[in-house]
Image: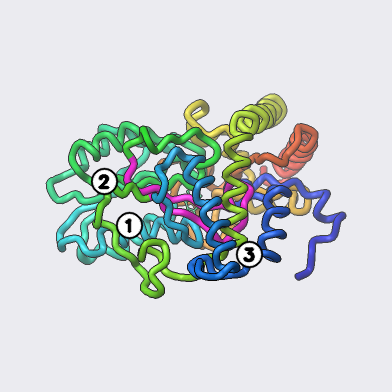
Amino acid sequence: MTPLTAASYQRCVFLDNHSTTPMDPRVIADMETAFRSVFGSAESRHHVFGNASGNAVDRSRSSIERLCGAKSGTIILTASATESNNLAILGSVGTSKDGSHIVSTASEHLSVLLPLRSLNARIESTILSVDSRGEITVDQVEAAIGPKTVLVSVIFVNNEVGTINPIADIGAVCRKRGILFHTDATQAVGKLPINLLELPIDLMSFSAHKIYGPKGVGALYVNRETVGTRLKPIMYGGGQENGLRPGTLPVPLVSGFGTACDLAREAMDDDANRIGAMRDRLWERFQNEIPNIVLNGNPTNRLYNNLNVSFLGIPSEAFMTKLRGIIAVSAGSACTSSNPEPSHVLMAMGIHSDRIESAIRFGIGRFNTMAEIEFIADQIRDTVLELRLHFR
Ligand SMILES: Cc1ncc(COP(=O)(O)O)c(C=O)c1O
């Protein structure tokens, strides 16, 4: 591994916390110990090594459950939120009768939309459009549900513009009709208070690396009382995770996930206040100092860490190239991602292509500081004003 040099690392401000987060040093410390001490298979409880690993997994599972108010024994560990979404969708409807129906939204992550598409030959899906702020309503969901609907899947917090969907109300509509309700809560868990004892959610996906934990481990919450036997595995093997997700568990990653959940629970209010203040300050500086900018999404109904802004007239590629080495962000255009399409979420919002092509997503995180925000606000103002002369 070639580490980033201290100089290049220190100069560049990481504001791409929606795509992933740096690990909390306390998570790293926990995992360092776990990598050295708990190498046994968590399934091999009959010997001391396996038993130590099994205990570490139990502790983490409890921490994950506690973070979202889930009952004991409801968390299936996976490798990522992508895998959790695939398991929730393909596992719950893969064996449904031909002609069954699913409702979802155009602002889902591709790890929801593409599994849905893969079922299209047999299972019909209604993909609800979102409004220009990225929102859907309970009425839209209710109107789309029909006699053949077996699953509704709606993202909790959108990863591009931070919109918070009315999950409790949508879940209540589904619960009333006995339809499974899945939510992709990858951007919500650890940031918003979630109490699964009260929320009518049947299946919920999330992962550790969005909450300052390690990459390579995720979770699917399964409400056993309401889901029953409707969820089937999509992989087969050693029968781990109640037969729903086979494979030997990566105990150090699971341990880090648990610690990240404990820290998220402790820091939730403080994170929200500090990060929200930084996000608001950045937007205030942009508004005061840079003309011709537009906020994408809903200015109030959105997660505290999200700021998605179009710097009109400046292709996001030019913005990113000019500021490479100074700031790490994501673009609404296709320029920086492995996906050759512009953001399908911004397109679904029906906003003009000028706005999509100039959109930049800022994701503020626990380890950013107000000094960084002031620094990058200066840099961005100077860069945008300079590029505007060029792209006139
Ligand atoms: C809303 C949402 N769902 C799913 C994912 C996929 O998460 P993972 O990287 O854990 O597979 C992401 C990652 O960006 C996301 O933001």
The residue labelled by disc 2 is: 226
Of 176 and 27, the residue lying toward us = 27
Which tag is nearer the camera, tag 2 or tag 3? 3
Q: Earlier in the sequence, mark 1 or mark 3?
A: 3
Image location of residue 111, percent across then percent down: 42, 58
Residue shown at the point (29%, 63%) measured from the top left: 232
- Chain-order first, disc 2 or disc 3: 3
Q: Quadrant of residue 171?
A: top left
Amino acid type at circle 2 is: Thr
Q: Disc 1 to disc 3, how far (Cα)?
A: 33 Å
Q: Is residue 325 left or right of residue 188?
A: right
Tag 2 and tag 1, C-beta contact below 8 Å: no
Disc 1 crowd rating (10 Å Cα; few below 14, some 14-19, many 20+) is: many
**Is the C terminus in the top left, top right, bottom left or bottom right quadrant?**
top right
209 in magenta: yes
**Residue 89, numbered circle:** 1
Q: Secondary structure at mark 1?
A: helix
Between the C-alphas of marks 2 and 3, the distance is: 35 Å
Q: Which amino acid type is shown beneath numbered disc 3?
A: Val
The residue singled out by tag 3 in the image is: 38
Identify the residue at the far right of this view: 7
Q: Is residue 204 visible?
A: yes
Q: Residue at x 62, y 48 (%)?
A: 259
Is disc 2 surrounded by few (<14), some (14 to 19) or many (20+) residues within 10 Å?
Answer: some
